[in-house]
Image (spheres, rainbow, N blue to C red):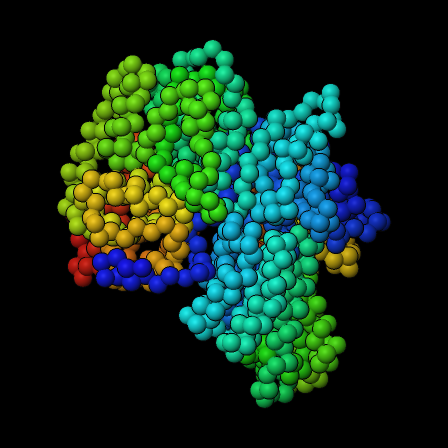
Amino acid sequence: METKGITLETYTSTRNACKLCSPLGASVVFKGIEGCLPMLHGSQGCATYIRRYMISHYKEPVDIASSNFSEESTIFGGNKNFCQGIDNIISQYNPAVIGIASTCLSETIGENIPGLIQEYKNLHKGETMPHFVHASTPSYQGSHVDGFHEAVYATVASLAVNTTKGEHINIFPGFISPEDIRHLKDILDDFGLDYVLFPDYSDSLDNPHQGEYQLIPDGGTKIADIKRCGSAKASIEFGYVMNKGGLNGKIKNSHTALTAAEWLEKQYAIPRYALGLPIGIDESDAFFKTLELLSGKETPTRHSRERGRLIDTYVDSHKYLFGKRAVVYGEEDMVIGLVRFLQEIGIETVLVASGGESGTLKAEIQKIDGISKDLMIQNGMDFESIDEVFDSLKPDIMIGSSKGYYIARKHKIPMVRVGFPIHDRAGAQRVQHIGYKGTQQLFDRITNALIEYKQENSPVGWKYI
Amino acid sequence: MNPLLTQRQTQITVAGKDSLAIDCDRNSLAGSVSQRACVFCGSRVVLYPIADALHLIHGPIGCASYTWDIRGSLSSGPELHRLSFSTDLHEKDVVFGGEPKLYASLSELIDKYKPKAAFVYSTCIVGVIGDDLEAVCKKVSAEKGITIIPVNAPGFNGNKKDGYKVACEAIAKLVGTGDREVPEKSINILGDFNLAGELWLLLEYYKKMGVHVTATITGDGRVDDIRNAHKASLNVVQCSGSMMYLAKLMKEKYNVPHMKVSYFGLEDMSDALYEVAKFFKDDDMMAKARDLVKNEFLRIMPVIKEYREKLEGKRAAVYVGGSFKAISLIKALRLIGVKTVVVGSQTGTNDEYEIIRQLCDEGTIIVDDSNPIELSTFVKQMKADIFIGGVKERPIAYKLGLGFCDHNHERKEALAGYEGMVNFAKEIYATAMSPVWKFTR
């Protein structure tokens, strides 16, 4: 593969993946349902690895149960483990909801999870039962992002009820940080909107200290609210790729994956506002305009002033940024948002890389105004490949998850950690990306990373900028 | 809410009271949020520190992603082990078979990274879709002229402990294939993972005693050293839960005797050195060991004493991977005045749990393959002040307002050896004495 004279060697293997497997995404979503305990139908390791991965990022308890397949269940089916698992979960956690995600193993041996749920319900007729939601997330299909959107879709599709249309709206923000969710809720509250935000893990994955180990942490979108999704007057979703991409590891380029908002539009004719992740002024403007439209109110002063302050900062710092070259990597919708934002502030993106394999990343990036034709855009890219083209791209900064750190370290350039995972820093839960305020945070972090780098490497050092 | 599942009651006991032995070595219960991972994980963590080998994981991406650079096992040379290689199986591979992808991946990676040997791990679905891992490994091995060892580790095939066994079998295939001359009085170090450079502290001690080290199998490991490991006179085994099986295999095949040691805490660390000297029946070696121990004690005891004065009366909970380490931790904690009130492990053995039962004060809760519900209940019930565990135990400690010491593979401070004991005391002190707890209690 060749872009602007830079040859990218292709490999069959994946070397330091820039993605995770789909049950992880589903687990994050299930943590965003009030009273929910996630369960993975598969081997013990899947649950433990995903727990460890999420705990390292969120620094919060993450209890995920496993049906804990044995050799016997692999050969004869997992129904015994499934039922025993559910029994034990109910006995220990007594959850309002059990969110079940499949794994590569259970999907490969052909486990019918809806059938298993039904079987369990039949066995326990007349007993009070938690809600069951199920997402099909074989890890050989797509990445954690696909698992995330699949779980959002599956939860909404199984719970939403179409009653008399209400005045409320649905908002499906995608995989953002707990602090981003809190900020989003502030914005929606300030507009006086009645809304259902799903998934809401702003508390469950970033809870105040309460002196207790909460088996199921506070917070999450209420079941009653998810039911209300079916009667909303509109849905907003963030993301141009989501799980709508073509291949995502599937055999046919014509799969039927829907997003939750698409399903609600198709099923109940609820209008869908498909927006990009609101990073930067343009994308945030689009979001605020949509809110103005849906609420019939002007943007509250607090937020218009935040917008003004952001522009003011753009001006103050533009000279530190102009012409700098960035390598941006991570989840597809996150990188699209970031590239749009960098374009606004005069940073030239020289590589856009994602482990996601939608096949639509390139087209989405190329839609961005003024984007360089030479920009290297790679679906299904891994970190070793990023490292191999790094020198020829001569970047000044890396922006993405903490997993790219080894490359930044090797090439001695600054990096700004965004998205998921951030395992080597404190405060990953509170990294902001979206809206005027989130962009402000991100903007200052990028500016300061570049200034700090210059200052540290200057023979003089200085006290003023 | 029921903190204790009936089926798990035999895996919990109390020191001094129950006469029943703990019923360990069982697979985790469905629906229980076990702190254990799987068979694959067991094999991966043991083989991981072999730094000049290629480690290729055959399966969908998750297993490779979650184990990328997961262990802080340092290498003094090559760092190939810190990369994460996967065949990243997709739907079409699952349907039509993953062998072509494995063949292509393995071949290209060997060409690119020129490893000394390769380990190819199978994951859950590999057996299910019928890939013949052995055949592919054999073929590529013949073509590339390097040793390729299949590691048969589907996650469901037992528990983490079974993964250790699979790893030992894989290492055993390398052992005995070298013909390097090895000096007399030479040992292999098994089961130290060189976290935060701990192995290098040990090497320094053994060097001072005049002991030659042939292979450090699970820390800063090298393929060629392992090939010659059978020539050593003795296998010194820490983390016996994972490595004793290899030691036994080597005893059977090469008649290399083994001994169990621990490098945590002053008592066990010193015993490890004395036992090796005793084994070689070498007075000079013993004298050097005594000298070393004496000097180290003189150096660090005053520091330890200071910490002890501050920590006296504190209560600790310990939940670690293996029960052998737990024994050392109980003793090390006692040395700094801290009483262990809850102790458990993911994959402990009966004998070691029995030692723990003898060692602990009456009333100490002992638990095998526990979960967050049990652990949070026990530490509250036993009024622990500090929790010693890994990443998954950390939020249990912090949410309950307990101090925490990471004694798992992510630690950045050496906790083994004499220096490690000082670091351990310092870390326990720092977490126990932090002023932040006034806001949580």
Question: Where does the image place residue A390, in percent across and percent down from the top left?
Answer: 29, 60
Q: Position of residue A51 (x, y in %)?
A: 55, 44
Residue in the image at 18% along x and 62% along y: A459
> Image quarter for residue B149?
bottom right
B398 sits to left or right of B266 = left
Q: Measuring 74% from the left and 54% from the top, which residue is drawn there?
A: B25
| Relative height, residue A366 to residue A229 (above, below) | below
Which percent across, then down, holds residue A389?
30, 61
Question: From the viewer's perspective, is residue B300 above or below residue A437?
Answer: below
Residue A53 visible (yes or no): no
Please state if B391 lies on the left or on the right of B345 as rendered.
Answer: left
Q: Vertical placement of A261 versus A406: above or below? A: above
Q: Look at the picture and state if B152 lies above or below B91.
A: below
Asked whether residue B390 appears in the rendered view, the answer is yes
Please state the horizontal and vertical placement of residue B212, each as a whole percent of the image: 59, 82
Locate the N terminus of chain B and report the quarter of the image it occupies: top right
The residue closer to the viewer here, A210 or B252, is B252
Q: Nearer the viewer, residue B56 or A253?
A: A253
